[in-house]
């Protein structure tokens, strides 16, 4: 379990939380963080073994209830079914964290129709369909929190990521639109835009020691962001302590300049 110590938010205890892409990286930290608050946590991911292993570890702690479904979020009907089953297993969903993402690189002239559509399906469309599915549950209670994970790449536009950048910019627009539409029902919608987060995937594929040194040159605080630090912000935004915060993009990037 992570060594990072999260603030305890009593308002999250016994709440039902649904997280996409929860088996590894930032998603795993989100699942662990909400579970440690005493929330009941449902999550989905393609990584079946990692998801099942996480469930086993959490159940040993006995802080709350946990439910995992292995699925591809591009199967939008399957995603809706997983949300429905989570409601049956754990109760009506109070918090949705749209975390799932795939930041594979694509050189624009070589990007196929299939690559482009798949990128948008994973990084943007799944978040909309998940929000659409939880909306009736939250509306019936008169409250709820949706946290959408975007990226500072939506603001900076790095090379070789046209689909990812476009999708993450779409997440910011969707956050504004849903916050306006859902606000009358007491539902808050916010975005988090992390900088480069030091996950196992990033270290394995792109975050070399040389790349880390170069990245830190652009930061006010010369440190890498840990997944648990993103989770801490998501906890706050989902708690009653943030009950007047909605329609905002919260950047956590160590002050990239």
Image: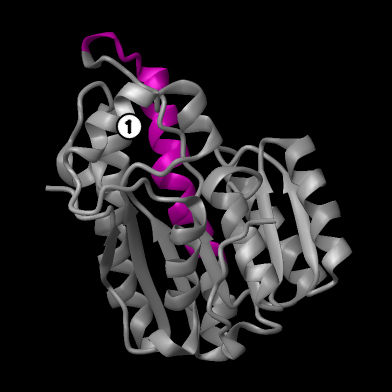
Q: What residue is shown with label 1?
A: 212
**Local crowd size for mark 1, using a 10 Å CA cut-off: few (<14), some (14–19), many (≥20):** some
Q: Residue at x 78, y 59 (%)?
A: 67
* Closer to the camera in the image, 100 or 86: 100
* Looking at the image, residue 22 lies above or below residue 84: above
Left/right placement of residue 218 relative to residue 23 reads left
Whole-percent x and y of residue 32? 66, 61
Q: Residue at x 52, y 49 (%)?
A: 26
Tell me the chief SS of the magenta region: helix
* Looking at the image, residue 34 lies above or below residue 53: below
Whole-percent x and y of residue 130? 53, 58
Secondary element type, mark 1? helix
Q: Residue at x 35, y 14 (%)?
A: 112
* Closer to the camera in the image, 84 or 32: 32
Which quadrant of the rendered structure holds the N terminus? bottom right
Whole-percent x and y of residue 202? 46, 31
* Closer to the camera in the image, 126 or 56: 56
Residue 72 placement: quadrant: top right
* Closer to the camera in the image, 122 or 62: 62
Does the magenta segment cover residue 3? no
Q: How is the image coloured?
A: one colour
Q: Which segment did they paint magenta?
A: 109-133
């Amino acid at each position: 379990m992570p060594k990072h110590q999260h603030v305890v938010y009593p308002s999250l205890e016994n709440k039902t939380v649904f997280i996409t892409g929860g088996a590894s990286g930032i998603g795993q930290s989100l699942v662990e963080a909400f579970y440690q608050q005493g929330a009941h946590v449902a999550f989905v991911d393609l990584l079946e073994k990692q998801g099942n292993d996480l469930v086993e570890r959490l159940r040993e702690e006995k802080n709350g209830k946990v439910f995992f479904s292995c699925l591809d979020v591009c199967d939008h009907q399957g995603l809706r079914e997983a949300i429905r089953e989570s409601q049956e297993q754990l109760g009506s969903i109070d918090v949705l964290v749209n975390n799932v993402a795939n930041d594979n690189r694509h050189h624009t002239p070589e990007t196929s129709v299939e690559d482009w559509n798949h990128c948008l399906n994973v990084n943007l469309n799944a978040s909309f369909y998940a929000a659409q599915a939880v909306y009736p549950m939250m509306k019936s209670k008169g409250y709820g929190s949706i946290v959408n994970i975007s990226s500072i790449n939506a603001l900076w536009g790095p090379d070789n990521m046209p689909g990812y950048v476009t999708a993450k910019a779409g997440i910011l627009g969707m956050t504004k639109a849903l916050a306006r539409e859902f606000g009358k029902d007491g539902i808050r919608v916010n975005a988090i835009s992390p900088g480069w987060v030091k996950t196992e995937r990033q270290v394995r594929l792109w975050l070399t020691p040389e790349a880390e040194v170069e990245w830190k040159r652009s930061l006010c605080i010369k440190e890498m962001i840990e997944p648990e630090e993103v989770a801490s912000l998501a906890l706050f935004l989902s708690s009653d302590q943030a009950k007047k915060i909605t329609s905002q993009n919260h950047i956590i990037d160590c002050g990239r300049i």
